[in-house]
Amino acid sequence: MADPVTVVVIEIEDPVAIKAGVSIKPFPIVQALIDYQRLNRSRFHIPGHGGQMLCPVPGFFDETYAYDLTEVEGLDVLSEPNDCIRESQERAAQLFGVRESFYLVNGSSVGLQAALLSVLQPGDEVLLPRNVHRSVISGLILTGAKPIWMLPEWLADWGLWAEVCPEAVGSLLKAHPNIKALVVTSPTYEGIASDIKGLADVCHSHGVRLLVDEAHGSLWPFSEDLPRSACHQSCDFVVHSLHKSAGSLTQSAIAHLPNGSKIDPALFQQALNTLQTTSPSYLLLASLDATCAFWEASEASQPYLQELLKHVHWFRKEVSFRLTAFSLYEHPQRNLWDPSQLYFRSRYEGGEAWACRLESQSQIAFEKTDAFGTLYKAGIGLKRQDYECLLSALLRENEYYDKNSGNVPCEFPSSPITLFPQVVLSPREAFFAPGEAIPREQGVGRIAKETHVHCPPGIPVLIAGEMIQREHEAYLPESVLVVRA
Ligand SMILES: Cc1ncc(COP(=O)(O)O)c(C=O)c1O
């Protein structure tokens, strides 16, 4: 530790100033963070801690640089854990009720890619609902596996993907006997779950592995009032972005092999080791450790979860009584839906227009918005006051519509951006094929060499190896990379 006499006190002003008299004008990233923080927005977005440290280690993260370490003598090695990381991961596995847990320092993304590398060989087929996250496409490039696409249920009134039905999966597995794995996003970004037990039964009866992307469901294992976690529903792999909703630092996540998983833990560790950095940040690892300790200490963490659900239920009631121009999505089955995802549609406008007004005029930051609606993510770091601000801002919008909309409802797009894809090459073949950049207008009929994604939600619009169709044009940049003709 530094000698207290030599400590330099830095006061962040605008620009950053050091008391000793030297003034440092920050490069743009530090400045952008300072500016964002100063807006003092209600953060209805990821990370779920909302800017507050919830983990039980006061002071620890104030000394960021003192604890910024990697694999040195006295600490442990993430790729071959034998000491504190191993012990922490074992406690995490107990907490989540799984056979083995693995800490991830590159989000759920790296966990999904490692899971695909553990179960697929080049040329294998993998069944993928079209709303998978882009990291799964990277997994296809890494493994050389071929996607068999299916469309999950599409809720046209809301512009939302919904569940993946076990019956539809069963028919596809019969038609494609070479499928080795199914990846399911459950919950979707907007909180809709699939029947994981039903999917597991179908998959296992065909000898197929079931990998569940539960990135947005990190709180589910800790509450009876939220849907049942895939960790306890007979699947082979689950991943949680703890940073999205459980309170850990951005990028920190956890992968699980549940009890009964058919994935070999040694193989999964090997796959992870090919993808993760050899200099994992101990700040991220400590954040995972502290977050798991927080959820293990239920007397400390449960009040946060109960508060979250209380605020959400209050907010939903107020919305249903008081807002006429907006509707808030509700799923008919409580056991297949997370109510903390607040997805709104306005009768009169697509999501972007009104969400941006709320952000600039009322300092309400959203998680995701598009031509259909806007998602506000209720996190454990938010306070009653944040919900009141959101409600007041929506009430003002409601009034505005009453005066200005002329009661003419808006026309929404009728189909998902993602059409049923015309696959020509596998993502890996397209990735390694010679390419050329061409203007977007000349793209129709050509094979995409790169994957185009709107983030969030990170769901690909067009995937490497697919034929570009006229409907894609609106979503592509001016110049597109295609496979050379
Ligand atoms: C459904 C889904 N899966 C996986 C990921 C990747 O998670 P991470 O950002 O932790 O890598 C995301 C990211 O937004 C996601 O929305």
Image: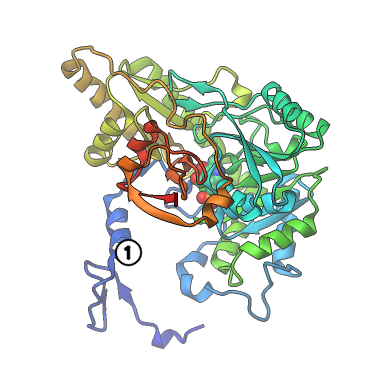
- Where is 57 relative to 441, above or below? below
How many labels were placed on the picture?
A: 1
| Residue 38 shown left or right of residue 210 in the figure | left
Residue in the image at 70% along x and 27% along y:
172
- The residue lying at 60 percent from left, 19 percent from top is 333
Answer with left or right where residue 227 lies relative to residue 98: left
**Res 351 → quadrant:** top left
Rendering quarter of residue 355? top left
Judged from the image, the secondary structure of the residue bearing numbered disc 1 is: helix
Can you tell which quarter of the image residue 398 is in? Answer: top left
Can you give x and y, in whole percent of width and height, for residue 470 in the image? 37, 32
Look at the numbered disc 1 and say if its residue's Cβ is closer than 8 Å to ligand 1: no
- Across and down, in percent, residue 93 comes to 74, 51
Q: Is 86 rendered above or below residue 150?
A: below
Does residue 447 appear in the picture of this structure? yes
Q: Position of residue 325 (x, y in %)?
A: 30, 18
Look at mark 1 in the image and give the residue it sits on: 29
Q: Is residue 246 visible?
A: no
Q: Nearer the viewer, residue 259 or 63?
A: 259
Q: Amino acid at mark 1?
A: Ile
